[in-house]
Image (cartoon, rainbow, N blue to C red):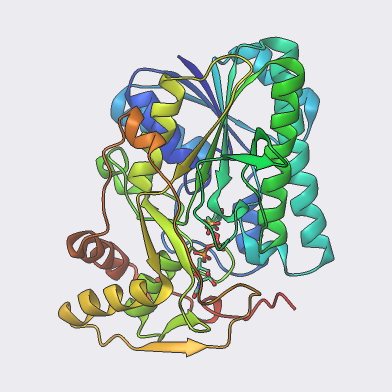
Amino acid sequence: MKILVLGADGYLGWATCMYFSQRGHEVMGVDNYFRRYASIELDCEPLIPIPNLVQRAQLWRDLTGKRVEVVIGDVTDYNLLLDLFRRHQPEAVIHYAEQPSAPYSMIDREKAALTIQNNLLSTLNIAYAVKETNPACHIIKLGTMGEYGTPNIDIEEGWIEIEHKGKKDTFLFPRQASSLYHTTKIQDTDLLWFYVRTWGIRVTDLMQGPVYGLSTEESAIDERLIPLFNYDEVFGTVLNRFIVQAVAGYPLTVYGRGGQTRGYLNIKDTMQCVYLSATQPPQAGELRIFNQVVETFSVNELAEKVKTVGDRLGYQVEIKTIPNPRAEKEEHYYNPTYTGLLELGLQPHYLTEDVLAEMFRVVGQYKDRIHRGAIFRGVSWK
Ligand code: USQ
């Protein structure tokens, strides 16, 4: 297949380019380096120095003989995006080209505006580019479990049937996000659902939980191919942060009561989920939604797991509860359904002590690069 990966330089983007390329697909990857520039601006650069996207594509070619074509550009520029669709003629487009951080979106009005502008315009442009060039092209958009929030009922896989005054209909599952970033993801879903109904395009929306991990099958070929790994408060996800904190001797930053429960997955499973979605597309005129998680944990449970493994490895891991800078429920019911991707063939990698120990091993090699000042700054929701 011809695959277009938007947001190809990010944590998931480059790993996805390699995953498809390794399996014989023709990949074009596009990125505007937003995440790299924002990490410099906020002084929270990734733990491991990573060659830029052009260099990584060259390295991939040298090591494997396979070509990933890369373009440095901004997909909110419609003419640029349209040109890329015409040149590459993708059968599937994978949309990661979003501002992905909840804390970033809450820093100030400018960053909120950038998040809205970037996330909604990129999604709109993709829908238009697909309609203009090839309405059969499958849009795979990375959504987020955070769109559903933490309702006091079971979370269905995207849709819910509602009976009201004796009549029934099926609707998108109710959404109630707890950050501006997550709110833009709800709006993305709504945009695409509108164009699915109106133009009959085909879309898969992957409601992903927080991802963890530092390696994929392909990055194991050479450490310079490793994913862009942030551990700071703005761009780092909670488990990745906890491992780095444990290695740095920084008390694990459990926000509030620590009962916040989410669905998690290993970056290796993100690769599988996106691949399974691309190779088994939905029908034209369908918005297919999968909940992309493989197990659920509370923040306290994650902290305890990291402490158990860290202590065993000789790190003296301390857990410290700090006032929650976010506005979110700290004790709540959480029971999402996540069977769709398993039915497509997902083989989950669960969070075992061995997986944690391997993360400790890699992070430990870069201990001297940990910038303690980036770990917690208290970006407040209030
Ligand atoms: N948390 C802590 N301590 C920390 C960092 C986070 O207790 O040091 C808590 C948060 O308050 C939250 C939970 O851990 O309750 C998860 O936080 P996170 O920063 O790992 O995840 P989040 O901000 O929700 O966002 C991340 C990704 C985002 C993705 C989302 C999936 O950055 O792109 O959409 O995970 S989900 O959480 O399911 O919405």
Residue visible at 33% across and 36% down in the picture: 342
Residue 261 location in percent, x, y? 45, 67
Q: How many marks?
A: 0
Res. 75 in view: no
Residue 340's place in the image compared with 48, above or below, is: above
Residue 290 shown left or right of residue 180 in the figure: left
Which corner quadrant holds the N terminus? Answer: top left
Q: Which of 360 and 195 is in front in this view?
A: 195
Res. 48 in view: yes
Residue 44 location in percent, x, y? 56, 68
Residue visible at 31% across and 35% down in the picture: 346
Residue 237's place in the image compared with 85, above or below, is: below
Which corner quadrant holds the C terminus? Answer: bottom right
Residue 209 shown left or right of residue 196 in the figure: left
Residue 112 location in percent, x, y? 78, 59
Q: Please tell me in which quadrant of the rendered image residue 241 appears.
A: bottom left
Taking the view exactly as shown, the residue that stands out farthest to the front is: 166
Q: Nearer the viewer, residue 163 or 333?
A: 163
Residue 372's place in the image compared with 105, above or below, is: below
Residue visible at 42% across and 20% down in the picture: 280
Residue visible at 23% across and 59% down in the picture: 355
Residue 182 location in percent, x, y? 66, 55
